Amino acid sequence: MQKKYDYLIVGSGLYGAVFAYEMNKAGKRCLVIDKRNHAGGNTYCENVDGINVHNYGAHIFHTNDEFIWKFVNRFVPFNRYTNSPLACYKGKMYNLPFNMNTFYQLWGVTTPTEALEKIREQTLPFTKQQPKNLEEQALMLLGDDIYSRLIKGYTEKQWGRPACELPASIIKRLPLRLTYDNNYFDDKYQGVPVGGYNALISGLLQGIELRINTDYFSHRSALHEVADKIVFTGSIDRFFDYRLGRLEYRSLRFEHERKQIKNFQGNAVINYTEREVPYTRIIEHKHFEFGDQPHTVITKEFPMNFKDEAEPYYPINDEKNNRLYKKYKSMADDVPNVIFGGRLGCYQYYDMHQVIGASLKAAALESFRHVY
Ligand SMILES: Cc1cc2nc3c(=O)[nH]c(=O)nc-3n(C[C@H](O)[C@H](O)[C@H](O)COP(=O)(O)OP(=O)(O)OC[C@H]3O[C@@H](n4cnc5c(N)ncnc54)[C@H](O)[C@@H]3O)c2cc1C
């Protein structure tokens, strides 16, 4: 008997929404479900008195891929927002990524030659060692001033562990710029959708059936009856009922606050790099869209351990977890008619352009399978 849908898509984040869009365009019948009370996954924005608040952390789109840039701009125009975060350490401000402005702020040097000489002097005591952990790696690459003020506290908060217990591989290289350029990304294209990410997601999901507040695991057997194939973008270990053990994640807690002030911090993103400040950054959302409202909304971002009820935001791709993921992946390869995708389905930190690319690829492969 023919099932009602060709695809049940679990998760309305970018992976699920792009997949649904492509298959719908190809004439397939799709049902998208999400356990949250809205679509869009972590790109979801809540409009607070005209300000699009990035509910799950700052999202800045960037890519070198012209096709993906044109693809997203089909649904919503993107503005020319350029990510230029600042770091605040003990009340002093530093530009990021590390560039001539940062070196001037740290050491008063004004030329690339002076900056290189200073970095050489700073790293000299650490160059002979083979770095065994993140701390040694960062000291070897950048020296003590940059490490202790701008890396150590922030990284320890982010990972919830001392830097000397973190693997060196987390920072294989730290980009240094010998120009006065505060643009965080090197990519050719970057920006934020005019009107927020919801416009992109609703464009992708237009004409497609969406059920929010619907957890796949609460309706598992019934949902399997309605579609020929499933696209699963939730946690892969949960899909297999944690049979081989649990994958680890880092989670986050967000504190949003509306303030009756026009401009709170003068920049969209400020990182707080001291260990003693409990949050890692403050986001002031109106700056993503050059807002002119008389009020503002800020969000403090607190990293936290992942426990049962928390949201899994960042996969911890260390050796132990990657080994476990590989085992789940080989189980997944043996499940017929289920495609695992996205950040949680593939246990991989994907940026938005990467998740869109992966989803377009999976959809193209599906279309190819239907033809041949
Ligand atoms: C704090 C933070 C900041 C980021 N900043 C950037 C940035 O600046 N630039 C950038 O390019 N990328 C950024 N990213 C990455 C970006 O969020 C991801 O690339 C993208 O959102 C991944 O899309 P996805 O569809 O794989 O996952 P998600 O967006 O997580 O969507 C998965 C969806 O599946 C749903 N789901 C899960 N389990 C179930 C279930 N059992 N039943 C039903 N539904 C379920 C979830 O509710 C969710 O809506 C950031 C990520 C985080 C966490």
Image (tube, helix red, strand yellow):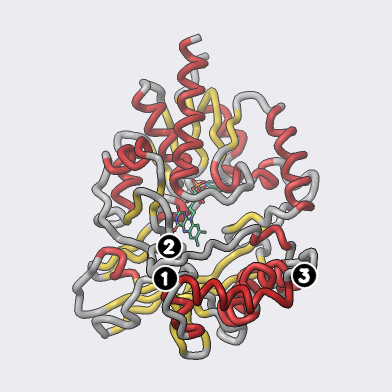
Amino acid type at mark 3: Glu
* Image quarter of residue 295: bottom left
Which residue does the image show at 26% across and 39% down from the upper left?
74
| CB at disc 2 and ligand 1 closer than 8 Å | no
Q: In the rendered structure, are the residues bearing label 2 and label 1 in contact, judged by CB atoms less than 8 Å apart?
A: yes
Give coordinates of residue 68: x percent, y percent. Answer: 38, 39
Pick the residue in front: 80 or 128. 128
State the residue position of label 3. Answer: 165
Q: Is residue 157 visible?
A: no
* Image quarter of residue 22: top left
Q: Secondary structure at mark 3?
A: helix
Which residue does the image show at 41% across and 66% down from the upper left?
179
Pick the residue in front: 47 or 222. 47
State the residue position of label 2. Answer: 184
Which callout, 1 or 3, points at the residue further toward the start of the chain?
Answer: 1
Which residue does the image show at 46% across and 88% down from the upper left?
92
| CB at disc 1 and ligand 1 closer than 8 Å | no
Q: Residues within 10 Å of mark 3 (few under 14, many from 20)?
A: few
Amino acid type at mark 2: Tyr
Which callout, 2 or 1, points at the residue further toward the start of the chain?
Answer: 1
Q: Which label number is shown at residue 332?
A: none
Q: Residues within 10 Å of mark 1 (few under 14, many from 20)?
A: many
Whole-number angstrom distance, CA of label 3 to CA of label 2: 27 Å
Amino acid type at mark 1: Pro
Q: Is residue 96 above or below residue 170?
A: below
State the residue position of label 1. Answer: 85
